[in-house]
Image (tube, helix red, strand yellow):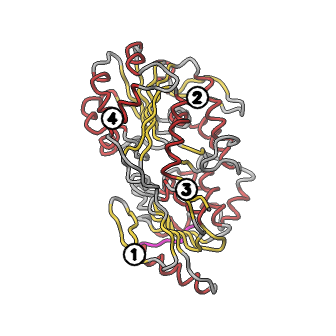
Amino acid sequence: MKVDIPYGKENVKINVPDDNELLVPNKVNVKNQDKLIEDALENPIGYKSYDEFSEDAEKLLVIINDATRPTPTSKVLKYLLPVLSSHPDVKFLIATGVHRAPTEEEYKFILGDTYNIFRRKVIAHDARKNEDMTYLGKSKNGTEMYINKLVPEYKNILVIGSVEPHYFAGYTGGRKSFLPGVASYKTIEMNHKLALNDEAQSLSLEGNPVNEDMVDAMNVLNDLNVFSIQTILTGDHKLFAVTAGDLHKSFDAAIEYSKKIFCVPLKKKGNIVITAAPYPMDIDLYQSQKALDNGKLALEDDGVIILVSKCRTGVGEDAFLELLCKADSPKKILEILGDEYKLGYHKAAKMAQIGVRAEMWAVTDLDCETIKKSQLKPYSDIQKAVDDAVELIKSKDKKPRAVVMPFGSLTVPLLK
């Protein structure tokens, strides 16, 4: 059987075993995109209208996602252009978390047609610049909340986010625009260490220490006036739904829409899983790891999981590769984590948890030595990787069964 797998902005056709299951985000009816935005703004959840919010805001800070997410920021900004372009004091803060600042091309992707209008008002958050941070207090878990000083300075915050499952925070969106979005490196490191907990997993909010820490950290920001716009996209990045209003209530409402798309029933696990990080989530190995983590939910023990991602800009967070390079096996990585932790180690830990029970292979543009250091077997050809996996499974006297996830970063398999 032939299936399409995204690699960068292109699709590659591959042959997979006859016994296979294709998992893609659920298909839904898509309505007029401008109407979705308009309806959400006119019917805010638990909050005054957007017009009232903007009219009352003498200074306005707009927090938007970076290029690692397909958030339709440009569509929302285009709709809000008449209000934003006439505002006397508006700034845009890119919620990079610990990612690098966007490139010129990525700024154009994020802001679209509004980039030339607002480019002088756009600032990329830099979590490592301590002089740009201000301390606001601690969460119950002891996370020290250092946040970009523009947030308390402006007080009136418009947040534009997108909501989809996240492998350790439960879901992206909502509170995530603040932590990790515009928090300091130290704050993010303290929060993300909680990802080592078994309860920190996709779709999990209640009892998830990472999510609960994010929500609790928001309590130190209770003096802010926040209007939230949360978007939900289909697997092919079309706008499916928009919620607006109170940060937490609009987030909760968006989750219900998100479940309809990204939670996909799985008939039976496979001994071969092919999971792709689609553009723009293929920016680096650090981000592409999410496709691995979702793919593991469809994988039998002692099987093979194949990550497909261009990793366009390299590996990503240095500490992630640093930990992977310290060990000669996934088991050793987990042993090291008992003694030390740095930001980025959580991703290595999640990969190691897969590696102790299955083979991990990767088709990327990265050099072979880097992939090997990352505890992955390197391939440059998707079909070759699949064919080798089939032969390996046959050598174990098993019938190959493949689960194919072309949008692995956005698909959460739920075993029936």
Q: Earlier in the sequence, mark 2 or mark 3?
A: 2
Residue with the mark numbered 2: 146
Which circle marks residue 35 in the picture?
Answer: 4
Answer whether labels 1 and 2 touch (C-beta < 8 Å).
no
Please name the residue shown 32% across and 23% down the image.
84
Q: Distance between the residues labelled 3 and 1?
A: 22 Å
Closest to the camera, between mark 1 and mark 2, is: 1
| 378 falls in the magenta region | yes
Q: Distance between the residues labelled 2 and 3?
A: 32 Å
Which circle marks residue 2 in the picture?
Answer: 1
User: Vertically, is 323 above or below 308?
Assistant: above
Q: What residue type is labelled 4?
A: Lys
Q: What element carries label 3?
A: strand
Please name the residue shown 41% across and 27% down the image.
62
Q: Which of marks 4 and 1 is nearer the N terminus?
A: 1
User: Vertically, is 370 above or below 130?
Assistant: below
Q: Nearer the viewer, residue 118 or 224?
A: 224
Q: Is mark 4 on a helix, strand or loop?
A: helix
Q: Which amino acid does label 1 sit on?
A: Lys
Q: Distance between the residues labelled 4 and 2?
A: 38 Å
Figure quadrant of residue 392? bottom right
Q: What element carries label 2?
A: strand
Mark 2 crowdedness (10 Å alpha carbons): few <14, some 14-19, many ≥20: many
Q: Distance between the residues labelled 1 and 2?
A: 50 Å
Please name the residue shown 59% across and 53% down the image.
347
Quadrant showing the C terminus: bottom right
Q: Distance between the residues labelled 4 and 1?
A: 38 Å
Q: Which amino acid does label 2 sit on?
A: Tyr
Figure quadrant of residue 138? top right
Figure quadrant of residue 114? top left
The span shown in magenta is 376-380
Which circle marks residue 412 in the picture?
Answer: 3
